[in-house]
Image (cartoon, rainbow, N blue to C red):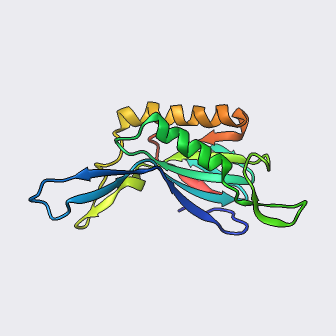
């Protein structure tokens, strides 16, 4: 069960630049478009990650970010996602009354990052297929590097993350 404390509700998906794969002429889908790293960003009043009944990370107001790694992702993709997430103007400016004016850093809010390979899943008939996701042995160090990028670009103590590969439960 996933639950989030949200005020007001806002979520968006960020993807890095398009990557194209040309398939053989025998295939009907000649120009299958494959996107690189994905991030689903949810503005939250608070969020936590629980593993085995124990809270492993939590933030107050800020952003919950589900990160999906594609097998072809590079450091430039990670840089792009980090920059975009931290600079998205999703919060109102209380001094001017202007909506959608400040980013998470200007508000001094937290960011909770969660690795989510299922963002690269699709149905093959009735069965999920995750072959486009980065394999776990490659994804774990890549994801840890992404978390470090966020910590270096913002305040280290404001960036939290779940446990890579664990069955996680999100809560408020």
In this rendering, the answer to whether 26 lies above or below 113 is below
Quadrant in the picture for the C terminus: bottom right
Q: Nearer the viewer, residue 143 or 16?
A: 16
Compared to 28, does 130 lie above or below? above
Q: Quadrant of residue 55?
A: top right
Q: Position of residue 71 (x, y in %)?
A: 34, 42
Residue 103 image offset from top left, x and y in percent: 73, 52
State left or right for residue 112 relative to residue 33. Answer: right
Q: Position of residue 12 (x, y in %)?
A: 57, 62
> Residue at 72% across / 50% down in the picture?
104
74 sits to left or right of 5: left
Residue drawn at x 62%, y 57% as measured from the top left:
171
Query: Residue drawn at (35%, 56%), measured in percent from left and top?
Result: 121
Residue furthest out toward the right: 95
Is there any visible trace of residue 53 in the rendered image? Answer: no
Position of residue 100 measured from the top left corner of the image (x, y, whole percent):
73, 63
């Amino acid at each position: 069960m996933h639950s989030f404390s949200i005020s007001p509700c806002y979520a968006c998906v960020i993807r890095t630049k398009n990557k194209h794969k040309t398939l053989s002429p025998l295939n009907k889908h000649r120009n299958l478009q494959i996107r690189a790293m994905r991030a689903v960003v949810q503005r939250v009043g608070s969020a936590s990650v629980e593993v085995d009944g124990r809270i492993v990370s939590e933030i107050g107001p800020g952003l919950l970010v589900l990160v999906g790694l594609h097998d072809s992702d590079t450091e430039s993709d990670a840089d792009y996602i980090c920059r975009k997430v931290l600079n998205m103007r999703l919060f109102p400016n209380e001094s001017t009354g202007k909506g959608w004016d400040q980013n998470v850093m200007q508000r001094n809010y937290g960011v909770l990052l969660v690795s989510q390979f299922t963002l690269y899943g699709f149905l093959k008939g009735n069965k999920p297929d995750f072959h486009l996701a980065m394999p776990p042995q490659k994804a774990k160090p890549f994801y840890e590097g992404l978390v470090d990028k966020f910590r270096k670009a913002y305040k280290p103590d404001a960036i939290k993350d779940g446990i890579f590969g664990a069955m996680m439960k999100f809560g408020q």
